[in-house]
Amino acid sequence: MRLAHSFVALSALSLILASAGHAAAQAKTFKVDDSGGSQIQFVSDAPLERTTGVTSKASGEITVDPASPASAKADIKIDMTSFKTGIDLRDEHFRSENWLDAKKYPHAEFVITKVSGLDKLEPNKSAEVTISGKFSLHGVTKELTTKAKVRWISGSEEAAKNKVPGDALRIQATFVVKLEDHKVSIPSIVALKVSPNITVNIDLRALAK
């Protein structure tokens, strides 16, 4: 009898471990790099001037199980030295130590720790989610929660249609960053040309590893 109980317990444990392994195997890792077509834009809409900066220099990884998107994790870095506003001198000012100090703090970073609002991520369908995590800029990290649109591109036809070599993930989000929260000061001489609240538009494209 004791032997039978031991066999049943061992069988149950094996099933649990197998199920756990199967669940873990469903998680997919997507890599964000320069070749993926990502674009990050910031918009400063001040009383006397509207400035838009753009970069495609984003990197990082996103891990998500389509059957359980709530467990998704991501770590995305944005190269602060690469933003272009259309005026080279203005770009230099933004990157200078008096502003963003891009030499000392070359990256902004968004670490996503929680995804909510979606039970299942279906292939080739857009979905609305809420993402939460920590956003770091100018050496200061703050909690950040924002809405996002997610699309998992899966299958050879969809991949070809979207000009990607295989499975891909696209994430679009917009949020506002308060410069004072990150200890970024605006010189008084340009106070009417730079908004204290910067709108950030993210369009990330990540390719399956």
Image (cartoon, rainbow, N blue to C red):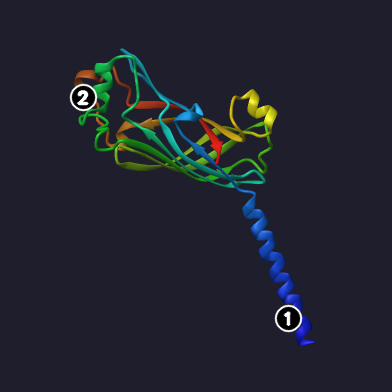
Among the 4 quarters of the image, the one containing residue 164: top right
Q: Is residue 113 left or right of residue 42?
A: right
Query: How would you rate the neighbour count of disc 1 (Cα within 10 Å): few for under 14, some for 14-19, many for 20 or more?
Result: few
Up-down relation of residue 193 to residue 9 (above or below): above
Q: Position of residue 107 (x, y in %)?
A: 34, 36
Residue found 36% across the figure and 32% down from its top:
79
The residue tagged with tag 1: helix, strand or loop? helix
Q: Nearer the viewer, residue 86 or 174?
A: 86
Is label 2 or label 1 in front? 1
The answer to whether residue 132 is visible is yes
- The residue that disc 2 covers is 187
Task: Classify the position of the C terminus by image quarter.
Answer: top right
Callout 1, which amino acid?
A: Ser
Task: Classify the position of the N terminus by image quarter.
Answer: bottom right
Among the 4 quarters of the image, the one containing residue 15: bottom right
Q: Are marks 2 and 1 in contact (CB under 8 Å)?
A: no
Q: Nearer the viewer, residue 200 or 15?
A: 15
How far apart in space, not on screen, are marks 2 and 1 (Cα)? 73 Å
Q: Is residue 12 left or right of residue 45?
A: right
Q: Nearer the viewer, residue 68 or 11?
A: 11
Q: Position of residue 62 (x, y in %)?
A: 52, 42
Q: Is residue 121 left or right of residue 133?
A: right
Going from N to C along the chain, the mark reached first, 2 or 1, is 1
Callout 2, which amino acid?
A: Pro
- The residue that disc 1 covers is 6
